[in-house]
Image (cartoon, rainbow, N blue to C red):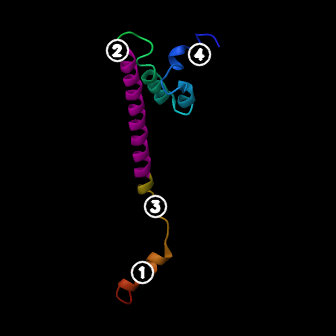
């Protein structure tokens, strides 16, 4: 492959593993964060600062997405709790045993 689709900074990791081998199994934001962490000392001559900032940006987006998803789940769970509970005959029989006769 040519350098634009398979650049060396994704293949020169000390582990010998190519970055995409891991990132293709992740969501977009986590995969991009890992990509920037992966190449942190391989592409730019700034001590990795630019790539670490980019990774942080994608991690923040992932956190935001997960927090919004979690809020949606909590809201849906609250809606379910407001719904009428299912009838449970065993619970009714237990309660009847606790009540005085004739009730």
- For marks 1 and 2, the one nearer the N-term is 2
Residue 42 position within the rendered picture, expressed as x and y whole percent measured from the top left: 44, 15
Which disc is residue 94 wearing?
A: 1
Q: How many marks?
A: 4
Q: Reading the chain from its start, which is encountered first: label 4 or label 1?
A: 4
The reply to whether the C-beta atoms of the residues labelled 3 and 1 are less than 8 Å apart is no
At numbered mark 3, what does the secondary structure look like: helix, strand or loop?
loop
Q: Say the numbered circle drawn on residue 41.
A: none
Query: What's the residue at 37%, 90% (across, down)?
Result: 101
From which residue to which does the magenta span run?
Answer: 50-79
Q: Looking at this view, name the residue that lies furthest to the bottom.
A: 101
- Depth check, mark 4 against mark 3: the one in front is 4
Q: Is residue 99 above or below residue 36?
A: below
Determine contact: label 4, label 1, CB under 8 Å.
no
* Badge 1 density bin: few <14, some 14–19, many ≥20, Cα 10 Å: few
- Going from the N terminus, do you reach mark 3 or mark 1 first? 3
Q: Distance between the residues labelled 2 and 3?
A: 59 Å
Q: Pointer 4: residues within 10 angstroms few (<14), some, or many (20+)?
A: few
Which residue has dot 2 on it? 47
Q: How far apart are marks 2 and 4 (CA)?
A: 23 Å
Label 2 vs 4, first from the N-terminus = 4
Identify the residue under disc 3.
84
- Check contact, mark 1 vs mark 2: CB within 8 A: no
Question: Residue 29, position in %: x, y?
Answer: 47, 27
Marks 4 and 3, Cα distance to the nearest angstrom? 57 Å
Determine the main secondary structure of the stretch shown in magenta: helix
Whole-percent x, y for residue 47 in the image: 34, 14
């Amino acid at each position: 492959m040519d350098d634009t689709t398979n650049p060396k900074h994704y293949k020169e990791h000390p582990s010998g593993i190519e970055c995409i081998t891991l990132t293709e199994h992740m969501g977009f934001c986590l995969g991009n964060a890992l990509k920037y962490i992966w190449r942190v000392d391989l592409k730019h001559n700034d001590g990795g600062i630019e790539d670490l900032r980019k990774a942080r940006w994608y991690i923040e987006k992932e956190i935001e997405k997960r927090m919004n998803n979690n809020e949606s789940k909590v809201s849906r769970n609250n809606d379910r709790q407001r719904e009428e509970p299912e009838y449970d005959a065993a619970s009714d029989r237990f309660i009847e045993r606790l009540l005085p006769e004739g009730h």
